[in-house]
Image (cartoon, rainbow, N blue to C red):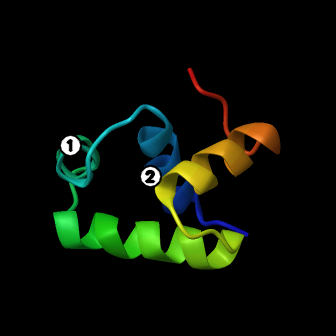
Amino acid sequence: ELTRRELDVLRHITRGQSNRTIAAELGISENTVKNHVRNILDKLGMRSRNEAVMYALREQMITND
């Protein structure tokens, strides 16, 4: 299961935002965003951000608002 912060990062990824933009919006470092992305991919068993986005939307883990 993803943490709340990982879900926040994933939500931003679904909007097509870069790690730099996500970091600025969440008030965290770009390296922290990279760590969250790596954790998301590991937990979901995915190889790319695009795969993770498609899975998250399909499984209704997040809404693309």
Which of the image's four quarters has the N terminus? bottom right
Whether residue 29 appears in this view of the structure is: no
Q: Which residue is rendered at x = 59% and y = 26% of the image?
A: 64
Task: Estimate the spatial distance between the alpha carbons at disc 1 and disc 2, rounded to whole Å.
Answer: 11 Å
Q: Position of residue 62 (x, y in %)?
A: 67, 39
Q: Which residue is rendered at x = 42% and y = 40% of the image?
A: 12
Element assignment for label 1: helix
Name which of mark 1 and mark 2 comes first in the sequence. Answer: 2
- Residue 21's tag is 1
Camera-nearest residue between 21 and 16: 16
Q: Position of residue 53 (x, y in %)?
A: 59, 46
Element assignment for label 2: helix
Asked whether, in this view, residue 26 is left or right of residue 48, the answer is left
Q: Amino acid at mark 1?
A: Thr
Q: Position of residue 18 (x, y in %)?
A: 26, 46
- Dot 2 corresponds to which residue? 9
Where residue 28 sits, quadrant-wise, is: bottom left
* Residue 64 higher or lower than 36, as above or below: above
Which of the image's four quarters has the C terminus? top right
